[in-house]
Image: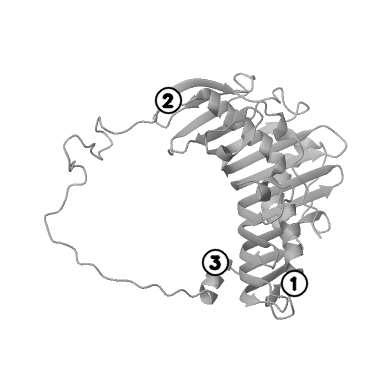
Amino acid sequence: MPHPPIATALSAVLVACVASSATTATEGPPTDPTESTLPGTPATDPTSPWTPTTPDPDLVAIEAALQTLVEVLPWLTPAPCFDAYQEVVDDQDPACPAYTRRGPIDTWIDVCVSEQGTLFFGGLNHYDDVTALAEDRLLDEWLVPYGPTVVPGWIPPAHLDGLVTGEAMESQATVTARSDEWQMNADAYGFDVRDGELAARYLALHGTCEWTWPTGSGWVDLPLAPWLDAIQIWAIGGGARRAWYDGAVDGLTTLSWGERAAPYDTAEFIDVALSSRELSACWTEPSGRIEVRDDGGHRYAIDFDPELVCDGCGTVSAPDGRVFGQVCTDFGQLLEPLPRTPGR
């Protein structure tokens, strides 16, 4: 569904003056970028023996990072961020911020101070009806092919009118009141679809949300920066469930869950899927890949193949193809219900 591009519109409202000065380059012969400028300095030629390689990983620490990633998922929910926004906008007035309405979207792009003294800065789209989003993101790609595998005999509807609940927000905005401040630089979506005996849930968090007060949401309360999409489809009243995860969670080094500290900063799901025991002979291990990254930027892939061996373990490798061994994690949390976004 088309909606006002927040970043583009903001550029018309928020004007910054930047002073610049010109510098004069010293003329000279062209420099070969593969040549070292100092004795013993590595060349940038990737075939050079000086080219740095990815160091051997800490497999125990990778296991800790994976477990932290899995355990934090139930705390990644946009609903408390949306609730906090509703609290801070209580101090708006009819002129600040200036709203426009397009279909199911309320939009404001403004820099203003309300009569109550609250500063509104930036821009925001708020969806109070997410039916079109659900049709675009769930119906054809997920519900049509996978719904009948979860609930045999289920027939996908042509449209989702009357079947969707939830809420969504796209924001590059800060709202500052006398006693608190809310800031969201993210796109966040959460909605449910229910039709007959089948249900589906979609969750997407792309960015950050912060508020002065604790909310009970890991997305708001913890220093995490997710870019994550998650989908679950399940049988209402039954055990059959499928789940898919794609995207990264950054900031794991700041967390410590019991004794499982996470020295790897970022973990990323890449086409990770898991099915319950009613649908799969291996419900303890996902298919797909999870990548972790340390603070130095080194990346390691953990590949899972439950059809080969069903043991909850994945093979760790570096981008250059070196294999370091296996790490194992309890992935049961991936099949637990995602947090619900009830809507308004």
Reply above or below: 94 against 89.
below
Reply above or below: 300 against 88.
above
Q: Amino acid at mark 1?
A: Asp
Residue 238 or 37: which is nearer the viewer? 37
Q: Is residue 186 left or right of residue 84?
A: left
Circles 3 and 1: CB atoms closer than 8 Å: no
Q: Amino acid at mark 3?
A: Ala
State which quarter of the image contains the C terminus.
bottom right
Visual colour scheme:
one colour
Kindly identify the residue that appears in the image at 61 percent across and 53 percent down.
Answer: 208
Of callouts 1 and 2, which one flags the residue occurring earlier in the amino acid sequence? 2
Residue 99 or 241: which is nearer the viewer? 99
Disc 3 is placed on an element classified as helix
Where is residue 337, by image quadrant? top right
Reply above or below: 101 against 287.
below
> Closer to the camera: disc 3 or disc 1?
1
Q: Amino acid at mark 2?
A: Asp
- Give the image location of residue 275, x and y in percent: 71, 31
Q: Which residue is mark 1?
A: 91
Q: Which residue is mark 3?
A: 7
Where is residue 269, by image quadrant? top right
Q: Which mark is residue 56?
A: 2
> Closer to the camera: disc 3 or disc 2?
2
Q: CA distance from mark 1 to mark 2?
A: 54 Å
State which quarter of the image contains the N terminus.
bottom right
Of callouts 3 and 1, which one flags the residue occurring earlier in the amino acid sequence? 3
Extreme residue toward the front, this view: 179
Kindly identify the residue that appears in the image at 66 percent across and 62 percent down.
Answer: 181
